Image (spheres, rainbow, N blue to C red):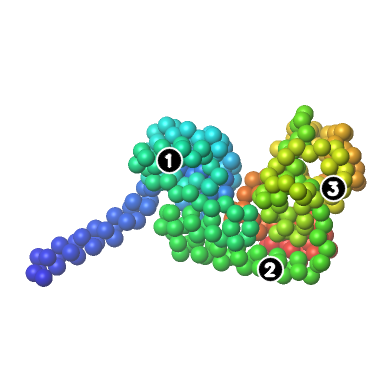
Amino acid sequence: MTRRQVLMALLLALGLAVAGPARAAEMRIVSIGGSVTEVLFALGYGGRIVADDTTSIYPPEAAALPKIGYMRTLAAEPIVALSPDLVIAVDHAGPKKILDQIAAAGVPVVIVSDRPTDEGVSAKIREVAKAVGAEARGEELVAGIEKTFARIKAVLGQEQARPSVLYILSASDGAPLAAGQNTAADGMIRLAGGRNAIQGYDGYKPLSPEVAVTANPDYVVVAQHGIDTLGGIEGLAKRPDLGLVPAVKEGRVLVLDANYLLGFGPRAPQATAELASHLHPALASDLAIP
């Protein structure tokens, strides 16, 4: 190789070394899914998000970003018009044909798995980190989360009892929507050392008064937005369905933000520990996360 060729190769290498970080710094990201947005902020990429969806409300900076609508009812045109370099979406975002249209328009689209388990949290973080080229930071984040989950499991291993939990996603004028199997709520209840009071179906379905009373949960957990439509705990107690449940009559009702409890993002260990401390009050001090 001649001296000229060596010099050109060196200049090219230096140029690439400078250009790489510059491109990362200028990356324009559209984030779809509250947990994906939380991961991006935790990785230090929150400032690269040009828009997110309506489920992206944490951290507060995410809530203030331009919105592209609800993650399950997306439209291609508003997203493509933002000229993003990357779209990152949870695997239940859609419709799928819309995401395909965005990809066909030349915008890279990365679909991230969203499993409601502690292993699923780690996988989600790694997938998002890989998409933005932040694998090292992703592994640091995963290491801390896995350590916290391990401690929670060790504490809960001291208790054999598994209190039953009825999770209500929403409840307005119609029948309350209760979480069955294969839901984020079911996954969180299991992680927190409880068991789902509703068996026999998957997903969220209307809950009849008879099923509510028969389930006889030890605790009722209601999403914050659900309880707000009822006028608080008092409104819940006056309902002809949930008002008949002993746990409601006796005040064993927990109200927690759905995105926080069911998001399975970076705050999942804290959410697990908080729910577990209610289900197992004797272990609350050991479950506390600094």
Which residue: 85% across, 52% down? 218
Circle nearer the viewer, 1 or 2: 1
In this orientation, does residue 252 appear? Answer: no
Nearest to N terminus: mark 3 or mark 2: 2
Nearest to N terminus: mark 3 or mark 1: 1
Q: CA distance from mark 3 to mark 1?
A: 42 Å
Residue 43 spot, x, y in % from top left: 49, 56
99 w.r.t. 186: above or below:
above
Mark sitting on residue 100: 1
For disc 2, the marked residue is 151
Local crowd size for mark 3, using a 10 Å CA cut-off: few (<14), some (14–19), many (≥20)? some
Local crowd size for mark 2, using a 10 Å CA cut-off: few (<14), some (14–19), many (≥20)? some
* The C terminus: image quadrant: bottom right
For disc 3, the marked residue is 215
> Foreground: 259 or 186?
186
Q: Quadrant of residue 207?
A: top right
Nearest to N terminus: mark 1 or mark 2: 1
Q: Amino acid at mark 2?
A: Arg
